[in-house]
Amino acid sequence: MHLRKVIAAVLIPFAAAVLVGLVVLWPGGAPAHERTGVGFDRQTQDATVTKVVEVSCKEAGASGVPPTGDTSTAEGSSAVQQEQGTCKRATIRVDSGDDKGRTFTEIVQPDQSRQLHEGQKVVVAYEPSAPKDLQYSVTDVNRRLPMALLAGIFAVAVVVVGRLRGVMALVALAISFMVLNFFILPAILQGSNPLVVAVVGASAIMLIALYLCHGLSARTSVAVLGTLISLLLIGILGSVFIDWAALTGNTDDNTGLIHGLYPTIDMSGLLLAGIIIGSLGVLDDVTVTQTSAVWELHEANPSMGWRGLYRAGIRIGRDHIASVVNTLVLAYAGAALPLLLLFSIAQSCVGTVANSELVAEEIVRTLVGSIGLVASVPVTTALAALVVSADRPGTEPALEASAAPARGGRGRRRKR
């Protein structure tokens, strides 16, 4: 009971501080800006490919033969092959916006990775300052239907297997997306410190998700406390090593565009915020699993003390550490696979690759998150063992002592 009071004395003020942080930092909406027409910062509309006909690339004017006629280079040779090939002229109809019903044509070269076909749903970019016949261009395929279908299959699978717990998990997932979209992202764009916003937002997600999915109990509170301590460690280590390694967080076109549109945003703080939010999901899994393991061990053997519970729980935790750390490393490596492939093509040495800021960011992200995961196992296991070992029924030893002499009158009293 004393340990439960201590946990409550920590978590209740923490939850109140998170609530205050949400109120104070809650954004009024992302500040407006003039569209640059670059990358994602473009006006887009839905459209449909209504007609596709094959035409000669030379007649369509889609060839790119160099003016000098030099075909010895790879670009020149490829241009000649394109000129001699067969292109497609696609007619696209705009389905949304002020120009709904308007059509335009686009030439698709044979070597393009995205080939259009009749009836295909696409996304088109709109540039009002361009000449009228060049205002629209196809930028991507409309994937809303397959993505929505896949999300529906996922939701059905979670509910069928998880039942009520699965429904609660989906509700928690929806709330997490709402916190991300309506609080974290607009607050950062509004100029708030990315680290503070990430800490408050991640803490709110953690409290809502864990208590909603696992109930308001001492078991869940221990998992929350273990997650909180691990997030604190991740934040400290991330801050130290991002500063020490001089990581700016501005390493690609997207971050460069963000910095150009909102120069007041601290990009290194944004990097640290991403590390904290990215680590939270795996941390929840580790802390909840370790806490449940200790509780189940106690149910199986109520007389086991906290040292025995800790030793048994940490043995389970070692297996968990091995699998989770490997999962985290492979997840980050998979996300950066095209970048690693480019370094492999360039035949760069490991030291050169690791020293580049693009890869160094992923290394710091992976190692800091993995250290937090590793630390969460002994911390959460120790907290769970301390709390659950205090639940040993006081009547069981007395009952066992009184029942023992029944065996020939020579029973021994058990130590309490």
Image (tube, rainbow, N blue to C red):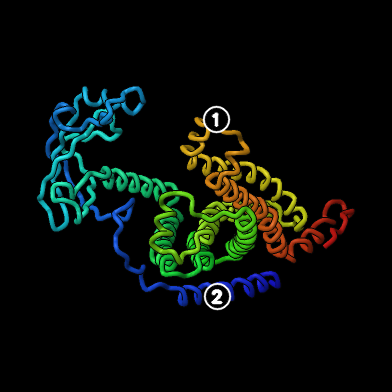
Who is closer to the viewer here, 345 or 223?
345
Question: In the rendering, which numbered label is found on residue 5?
Answer: none
Q: CA distance from mark 2 to mark 1?
A: 51 Å
Mark 2, residue position: 17
Residue at 17%, 32% in the rendered image: 61
Q: Label 2's element?
A: helix
Who is closer to the viewer here, 18 or 194?
194
- Write down the quadrant of residue 37 in the picture: bottom left
Who is closer to the viewer here, 98 or 386?
98
Total numbered circles: 2
Circle 1 residues within 10 Å: few <14, some 14–19, many ≥20: few
Q: Position of residue 239 (x, y in %)?
A: 61, 60
Question: In the rendering, which numbered label is found on residue 347?
Answer: 1
Q: Is residue 354 visible?
A: yes
Residue at 51%, 37% in the rendered image: 340
Q: Which amino acid, mark 2?
A: Ala
Does residue 351 appear left or right of residue 276 in this picture?
Answer: right
Q: Is residue 296 visible?
A: no
